[in-house]
Amino acid sequence: MNREFLINMVLLLGLAVVPLWAMAGDAPFTITLATKVAILALAGVGLNIALGIGGLISLGHAAFFGIGGYAMGILASHAQSYTALMEWPILIEGTKFMPVIWLVAVAASALAALVIGALSLRTSGVYFIMITLAFGQMFYFFAISWPAYGGEDGLSIYVRNGFPGLNTLVPIHFFGICYSLLVLALWFNACLAKSPFGLALNASRQCPERVETVGLSPFRLRLTAFVISGAITGLSGALFADLNRFVSPTMFSWQTSGEIMVFIILGGVGRLYGPVAGAALFITLEHFLGGLSEYWHIYLGVLLLLVVLFARGGIIGMLAGRQVAHD
Amino acid sequence: MTNPILATHGITKTFGALKACDKVSIELRPGEIHAVIGPNGAGKSTLIKQICGNLTPDAGRIELLGRDVTGLSTQARAGAGLARTFQVSALAMEDTALQNVTLGALGARGGAFSMFRSALNNSALRSTAMDALGRVGLADQAATRTAELSHGQRRQLEIAVALTLKPKAFIMDEPMAGMGAEGSKRMTGFLDRLREQAPILLVEHDMDAVFALADRLSVLVYGKIIATGTVAEIRANAQVRHAYLGGDA
């Protein structure tokens, strides 16, 4: 057992204990903050698969986050207005049932990632960053100019979507759902990192020539990673929309892509729990510094600068030391 | 005569006005080490890149085991049985030696899309990988990060990755580059035995190694093969002596 594993467990337990303690102390807002951390960490876990293992610097992950959000918004808005989403050729109705919404969010964002990835992954470096950014912006402006679902004003969902056996309006129940999905995603990410796919993807980041020379295609590995990454970020988008009971084009904005990336950089690029540490720190800072000044991002900027300059492995790297190679 | 494992038929590649490769025909026969020598800029790297699929020839054909592979990608050629080692080690530097050879074993298996099982705990992959490391003498360095290996050890690791592919032919771009005299000697001994497994197309600057190993030599000058033959024939060839080995050789 190494230090990084211990730190990870402390993080994961801490994220569970804080809302439980808040529930005992009747502080529902703290539970909401913890829920936000879990959801944003999930978005980060998604991006970390592409960025941390695959080295794909995507500045367009807001597209998937937003698609997940709008998947929820569109389905739920039809359900709350009792109108069908589509009547011909087949009848599709809206739904307030979370598992179905998640499935749609994951499928839609995976499909988008497949198309965006297939086009963007033909480039690399700065061009890749720019083309993913461009795709993200396309979705942003599309959402703004699409009046059917609120356009610029966004879309309000009055009652949180349901999950069988739970009352999702009780903050701790909804937290439990988000936390479980985060743990599931982290477990999957841990498996993936050690799997043949993870090994080959990791090598494609470091030395694509080598991967080609052994007969594997870096492009296909990256595309697969990009799709998985987009799907996980899409799922977190659906949860984020449910948390706020509101969807707006902001979810598609490039600032959202940037924030997801900031979680990873703060926490540690390529570190399994980097996004959890990063999202927790981000939300804590937003909560406390945001209370002091509207311009709290200045402090975030300074912190980010310090991390990039002096702690390349992020918070996890600083605490755990160098990444240990898998046995 | 036996059919060649690998053959190029009149491949030509020009970059602007420069003919980097001019109607090059070369054969790699079973069990042989065929060395390609030539001064800097003679087009050796261009030749290797075309054989391995990084460059497409403007004209000519490349055949592997009698099959035309000219239009195939690098990955497809690797799958068909070409194993290349690079002049400058191309390895995943942050990964361990074992992870690098395991990547080769994955390539040989033909796919790396399993996501739930550990790669390094897979017994089939592990035995292929450890076997290859053992053969080049790096078994005790399995858990060392590649970045921390010595230059010579990285050259050996390159060969180990190639071994995991169980190739039909090895393409080696200066495997002795930057190795000390001792390492060079050991590598020579190793390659000498390796030819029994699969023939080697060897591009090398170390003439002692070339003369000790090569069954046949091709001399490449300004993109053209000026002579092909056994070591003795090449040594005796006046044109080669003039162009490359130096007049008094």
Image (cartoon, coloured by chain):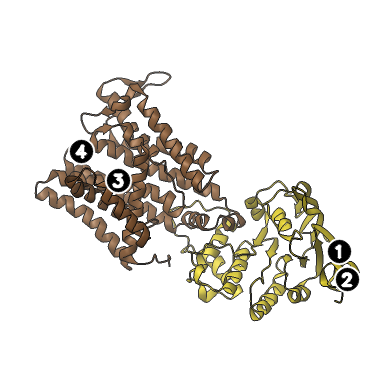
The alpha-carbon separation of the residues under discs 2 and 4 comes to 85 Å
Q: Secondary structure at mark 1?
A: strand
The alpha-carbon separation of the residues under discs 4 and 1 comes to 81 Å
Q: Which residue is mark 1?
A: B227
- Contact between labelled residues 1 and 2, with CB atoms less than 8 Å apart: yes
Question: What kind of residue is marked 3?
Answer: Leu
Q: Secondary structure at mark 3?
A: helix
The alpha-carbon separation of the residues under discs 2 and 1 comes to 9 Å
Foreground: A293 or B142? Answer: A293
Return the disc, 2 or 1, that comes first in the chain's sequence: 1
Q: Which residue is mark 3?
A: A40
The alpha-carbon separation of the residues under discs 3 and 1 comes to 66 Å
Q: Which residue is mark 4?
A: A168
Q: Colour of chain B?
A: yellow
To which chain does the residue with label 1 belong?
B
Mark 1, other Cα within 10 Å: few <14 / some 14–19 / many ≥20: some
Q: Secondary structure at mark 4?
A: loop
Question: What kind of residue is marked 2?
Answer: Glu
To which chain does the residue with label 3 belong?
A
